[in-house]
Amino acid sequence: MIRLQGRIAVVTGGASGIGQAFAKRLAEDGASVAVADIKQAAETRAMVEAAGARFFGGICDVTDPAQVAHFAGEVRATLGDADILVNNVGIFPLQPFDAMSVEDWRRINAINTDSMFYFSKAFVPGMRAKKWGRIVNLTSTVNWLMIPNYVHYITTKAAAIGFTRGLANELGRDGITVNAIAPSLVRNATTEASELASMFDAIPSMQAIPRLQVPQDLVGTLSFLVSDDAAFVTGQTIAVDGGLTKG
């Protein structure tokens, strides 16, 4: 089913991990895909083009509004006005509150929170002109769990939910929906190389589905939320977590 034929999608942090899986699925659903990342997205390009979709990749510091605006202009010139925005980019350093500096706090908020604002500001006008748009923000089930050394990360992921609800309320009249996806701990190359790898054995036993989550587990929910099937779904946070959160 080519449910996104003719649509243009933007994915932040799409060079690897969850963002790469999102880009691949959007292409398989028929959308042209643009990826913004701090590194080259050659592997993602190969996946998107193998699915028969157009691709644009731009090196972009998502914390710099000027670079985001420049990237948005390149997307418009190359693919056209975006219909879909996936605010996926994020970092997740484990760090005790007492050891957290002002610079640490500002960096994670700039990447995880400010980038959602910059990209939405850049692409919402084109969606408004079309009277159709889909924005999906990546949050986390960490909001509902008591995990230590994560004050800054939890704050940014709670902000993603607030941003989702607030923006949905303002954009609904323009045919634009805004929703969020909250995964469990996802196993990919990035988490495997981080301190989170130490939690790989513990998390599955806390879930109703007792296996570690992988990026592919998230793409079906994204595909639904950015389609016409979800035209009346907005302001929602959907936990795709194998039953980690139960309530």
Image: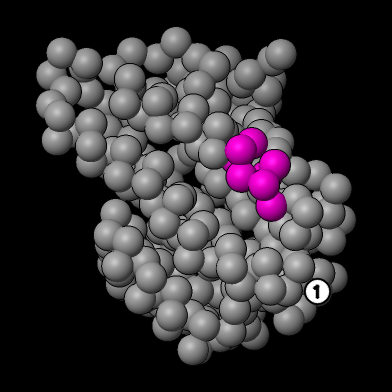
- Evaluate whether residue 69 shows in this view: yes
* Depicted 53 relative to depicted 1: above or below: below
Stretch of the chain drawn in magenta = 164-171
| Residue 3 placement, left or right of 171 | right
Q: Is residue 235 magenta?
A: no
Depth check: give the residue in front, 92 or 84. Answer: 84
- Residue at 61% x, 45% y: name it: 167
Quadrant of residue 29 in the image? bottom right
Residue 134 placement (x, y as % from top left): 68, 58
Q: Is residue 30 something that shows in the picture? A: no
Identify residue for label 1.
2
Foreground of the two, 73 or 53: 73
Q: Is residue 117 above or below residue 122?
A: above
Location of the N terminus by quadrant is bottom right
Q: Residue at x 33, y 13 (%)?
A: 148
Q: Is residue 101 left or right of residue 149?
A: left
Q: In this view, does 156 lie above or below 199?
A: below
* Secondary structure found at label 1: loop
Taking the spot 80% from the left edge, 74% from the top edge, the residue there is: 2
Which is nearer the eye, 235 or 172?
A: 172
**Quadrant in the picture for residue 3:** bottom right
The residue at 54%/39% (across/down) is 163
Considering the image in quadrants, where does the C terminus appear? top right
